[in-house]
Image (cartoon, rainbow, N blue to C red):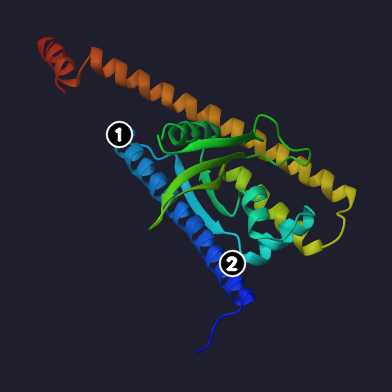
Amino acid sequence: MVTNTPEQITLKELRTDLVRFMMSHKFALEEINTKINILKEEFQYVHDYNPIEHVKSRIKSPDSISKKLQRKKLEISLESIKQNIRDIAGVRITCSFISDIYKIKAMLEGQKDITVLECKDYIQHPKPNGYQSLHLIVQIPIFMSDREELVPVEIQIRTIAMDFWASLEHKIYYKYNKEIPQRIVNELKEAADTASRLDRKMENIHEEVIGLKQLEDDEAKIFPPESLQFLLANKGIKT
């Protein structure tokens, strides 16, 4: 009869705990994605408008988690991960307009089983390099076979312009693999400012179009088409 040594039992338990830990984040990500899809479809149905353009999600790999712990000079252990890493599960939501970002934030905050642990508004307060986005760390309950887990998920919400800039900026830094020359840093900041101005301009146009549509709707309520046709007919005008 073969018996496991204490070391083998400990290793097996650690492996099981790690698998369950990663699974809980996978389930939390699926739960958040389901909620986002429900809000997206409901908003489209009720308001005839969809504030969400794209949704991407990911789970950090064990290697990526380990590197983050090393960068932060933290102990590489499951307990250390639980205490210090809250973006293992991540969702990125891309919107058309800045106002959509805060609509989605409010809708997520309105969910009874979602608790907002942290909010970083890099739109009102951009990073020095020009980066803009709204970051939320939320907590959602996941019901396992024998327990309930409260799992953190990072949600980034940004416009198409913000996402375009952030994606290219990341690629530039990743490819260069050294300290970026100041000239390029300045140009990237200028590009971020240009993207921000574009966002504000498109937001103003969007609001103006909504105002015009509302004015047309109000006029239609005061003078519905059938009443206008009746008035014209009484005056002998054919329509």
- Return the x and y of residue 158 as percentages of the image width and height: 57, 41
Q: Which callout, 1 or 2, points to the residue nearer the camera?
A: 2
Residue annotated with mark 1: 46
Write the residue at 36% across / 18% down: 215
How crowded is the residue under tag 1: few (<14 C-alpha within 10 Å), some, or many (20+)?
Answer: few
How crowded is the residue under tag 2: few (<14 C-alpha within 10 Å), some, or many (20+)?
Answer: some
Q: Secondary structure at mark 2?
A: helix
Give amino acid for label 2: Leu
**Of label 1 and label 2, which has the lower sequence position?**
2
- Return the x and y of residue 14 as percentages of the image width and height: 59, 67
Q: Secondary structure at mark 1?
A: helix
Write the residue at 48% across / 26% down: 207
Give amino acid for label 1: Val
Give whichever of 5, 141 is nearer the camera: 5
Asked if disc 1 and disc 2 are in contact, CB closer than 8 Å, the reply is no
Give the position of the C terminus as an image quadrant.
top left
Quadrant hosting residue 117? top right
Please give left or right for residue 71 compared with residue 83 in the image.
right
Write the residue at 41% across / 22% down: 212
Quadrant hosting residue 202? top right
Q: Which mark is residue 14?
A: 2
- Return the x and y of residue 113 as percentages of the image width and height: 41, 38
Please give left or right for residue 15 compared with residue 110 in the image.
right
Please give left or right for residue 92 compared with residue 164 in the image.
left
